[in-house]
Amino acid sequence: MVKGWLAADHAPVERMVPVARRNLFAEKGRFAMSVAGLAFAVLLILIVVSLYRGWSRTGSVYEKLPGDVWLAQAGTIDPFHSTSLLPSGEQAQLERVPGVLAVLPVYARHLAISTRKGRRLDVYALAIEPPRAFAIPADARTFLPPRGRVVVDRVLAGEAGVGVGDRLDVLGRTLTVAALTSGGNKIIQFAFFNAADGKALLGEPGQVSYYLLATKPGADLTTVGRAAAAAVPNSEPHTSAEFANAFSALVSAGFLSVVGVLVGIGFVVGGAVIALTTYTATVEKARDYGVLKAIGAQGGFVYRIVVRQSLIVGLAGSLVGILAAAVAADLIARWVPEFVTDLRGLDVCAVFGGALLMSIVASFVPVHRLNRIDPAIVFRA
Amino acid sequence: MTPPLLRVEKLTKVFGAGRTQVTAVDSVDLASDRGEITLVMGPSGSGKTTLLTMIGCLLRPTSGRVEIDGLDITALPAREQPRVRRTLVGFVFQTFNLLDTLTAEENVEVALNIAGIKGAPAAARARALLEAAGLAGRLDFPAAGLSAGERQRVAIARALANDPPLVLADEPTANLDSTHGRETMELLRELAKGRRCGAVVVSHDERLRAIADRVVWLEDGRVTHAEEAQAAAPVRRSAARGGSFGSV
């Protein structure tokens, strides 16, 4: 008889009664509010992260320019914090450095461009002077406009209220907008001039800002950079990737901690929403859990119901939040281009995983309450 | 000699200590076998429900022992008690205690899930039990939408889901009108006689004497007298309900 009793449990087969789902959907209003609360938290987290990513990639425009190594004045931190001045006329010397294909003098500086409404925009302007024999890569040609033309990023175009074919006044010269590029943001915008215009607008007589070195295929950038720096007194090399990362580092230094705090707050708020919902639902259904315990449910069976409830809210809230973030990022890109967003799949996956983890953690909140439910509650009328 | 299905020996429960100490159940002896219905009667506060709670492995006695099907459940560790409740005992409550967010079928199925039976076999058994309880047309009804009589029938089907040898019923007719009370009595009688279950029924309802094989009178936690019924009176079968638990 005792053996029979011990053998009375059966092997698991398949579907079970969806108690968690039924409990949640029985209170549709509360379920919708919980999902909305978590979705809002996920939306905020993703928008903050995508803004951070978007701003961080601002410097990537440097990797699109026709060269790999930048020779700058010694002590140059990055293009945005330092002014670099090198003697002009060093091209022939640099062209003799092994691994160098072409040498492109660059004229660059921050300057103010006035908008039609009288606003002065802080623009980082560059003019690159390619040698005549140099075949400019197709994707870099955009940044080398003909004389009298200027290429600006979309944020600058939006701020200045100009489009392709419009005229832009720069330090007394009127230039026609030849093309729009990506890369600008609320902090900094880029303008690319023809070398002749650049010399006049940006250059100091007898000096250039940088030498941009196009290297031969397979050349070691570090070796080329060192040799080039040895050829020009008081200079130091930086790769395009280093300059590109400089803005990313600038954004990280200024905003990463803020982003971290905002993301943390987002997760705490999301977790609190799930924990509160799960706890309230557990308290309200205490008698039901008592009934389940009374008819033989182990703690694990009851706890799984609570975890499932929590996960359903987490899953639904995350998916709605991700969808809302994708829509919001798209709308921001259209309506407020200076807030550059970059919603990356990996970030979405991380936030999704984080939200699900948060759901599981939040389901621990009512565990103590669940454990305290006395199954004998079923005999109380 | 085969031991009785249920044997209760010197069962005692004391609550509190010192001046607030209360002996709710005091040295109760009881025995019941398969196919028998034991009716425990007594005034409010006499310890009936406490006795039932201890037999149902929901409350540890202060002393004494309870054996079900030869197993001393009072000696089991706490982690084994849920297993007793899902395999050896079926509960029928005064307030039905159905899960209102589930359908009638799901309320029975969840008891099977707890015992590890899932999917189609669980659904099929739940349907068969509810059909036997005359609720074939109410399978997908939310529990909250059923009448009191229907709810109690679902509760009885749930109690039988895992085919327990013993059914414990606490005031099963108290919240029912006379018609539904009679139906419930009929079901209890069927499960005792048809399925050869033992049943311990706690009630104030004198009508239940009609189906009891033994009546035990409890007062101040003590059995004051017990009587064997001469012959259980036949219960008029409800025309509204078909089927029988005996075959499920």
Image (cartoon, coloured by chain):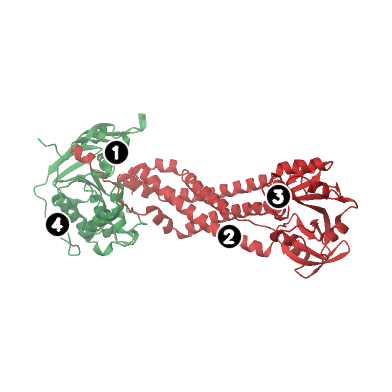
Chain containing the residue with disc 2: A
Q: Which residue is mark 3?
A: A216
Mark 3 belongs to which amino acid? Lys
Mark 1 belongs to which amino acid? Gln
Cα–Cα span, label 2 and label 1: 51 Å
Looking at the image, which is closer to me, B35 or B21?
B35
Chain containing the residue with disc 4: B
Q: Which residue is mark 2?
A: A326
Are labels 3 and 2 on one chain?
yes
Cα–Cα span, label 1 and label 3: 79 Å
Closer to us: mark 3 or mark 2?
Answer: 3
Q: Which residue is mark 1?
A: B81
Color of chain A here? red
Closer to us: mark 2 or mark 1?
Answer: 2
Q: Earlier in the sequence, mark 3 or mark 2?
A: 3
Mark 4 belongs to which amino acid? Val
Neighbor class of circle 4 (other Cα within 10 Å; few <14, some 14-19, many 20+) is: some
Q: Do we see residue B43 in this rendering?
A: no
Q: Tell me whether circle 1 and circle 3 mark residues in contact (CB < 8 Å).
A: no
Task: Say which residue appears at 39% left-offset and 47% top-offset.
Answer: A304
Cα–Cα span, label 4 and label 3: 103 Å
Q: Which mark is residue B231?
A: none
Neighbor class of circle 2 (other Cα within 10 Å; few <14, some 14-19, many 20+) is: many
Looking at the rendered structure, the secondary structure element under dot 3 is loop
Looking at the rendered structure, the secondary structure element under dot 4 is loop
